[in-house]
Amino acid sequence: MTFETISRRGILGVFATTTVAAAPVMANAFGLMRGAGDIRRVRMYSGRTGESIDTVYWVDGKYIRDALNEINVFMRDWRTGEVIGVDPRTIDIAAASHRLLQTNEPYMMLSGYRSPKTNAMLRSRSSGVARNSLHMVGKAADLRLKSRSVSQMYKAAAACQAGGVGKYSRSNFVHMDCGPVRHWGA
């Protein structure tokens, strides 16, 4: 059976048999995260800066401040060097999706935080960049995996029912954010 034939109900069934650890925020939306166990880990690299991150950022129901600070620096606007606090819920969605995809390959992060200046520049070049992008407030990430298709990543992120998920097949990435639950690019 391939990932694409697994239903959301099947995914939830698998997680229902695991230990439950409640998330401190968005408890209803992070049903899949509750099944993720007592440790949450994020693995990413940036093709833009050559940097990588592999860190546990949540243990026993608590975020680890030093790990979140490391994530904030990693996900900075690489064009301007500006760093802000990335919303940990965005990382939770990426981590839960990664777990569903059952791969050890780190995400390639194409875009994390974007300063308003960077967002305006990108918007002037592409109609696909939102004027009020959640990237500008540290609530979004554009991610890619070599070992999984955009469709597989999109389905995993959408199964989390925890934020916005955009499928960008031509550009080979998936947008994940912790805003309202919505989907586009299907």
Image: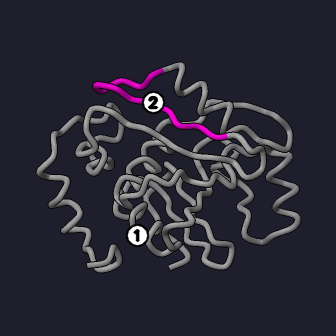
Q: Which SS class for mark 1?
A: helix
Q: Amino acid at mark 1?
A: Lys
> Of circles 2 and 1, which is in front?
2
Quarter of the rendering containing residue 38: top left
Q: Amino acid at mark 2?
A: Tyr
Are dots 2 and 1 in contact, CB under 8 Å?
no
Magenta-colored segment: predominant secondary structure = strand
Q: Nearer the viewer, residue 38 or 165?
A: 38
Which numbered dot is residue 57?
Answer: 2
Dot 2 crowding, Cα within 10 Å, few <14, some 14–19, many 20+ = many
Q: Is residue 55 magenta?
A: yes
- The residue at 73%/52% (across/down) is 47
Q: Is residue 168 left or right of residue 16?
A: right
Q: Is residue 146 magenta?
A: no
Q: Magenta residues, as a range?
A: 52-64
Quarter of the rendering containing residue 125: bottom right
Which of pointers 2 and 1 lies earlier in the amino acid sequence? Answer: 2
- The residue at 62%/54% (across/down) is 108
Q: Position of residue 2 (x, y in %)?
A: 31, 77
Q: Is residue 163 above or below residue 153?
A: above
Residue under pointer 1: 155
- The residue at 59%/37% (across/down) is 53
Q: Position of residue 103 (x, y in %)?
A: 41, 57
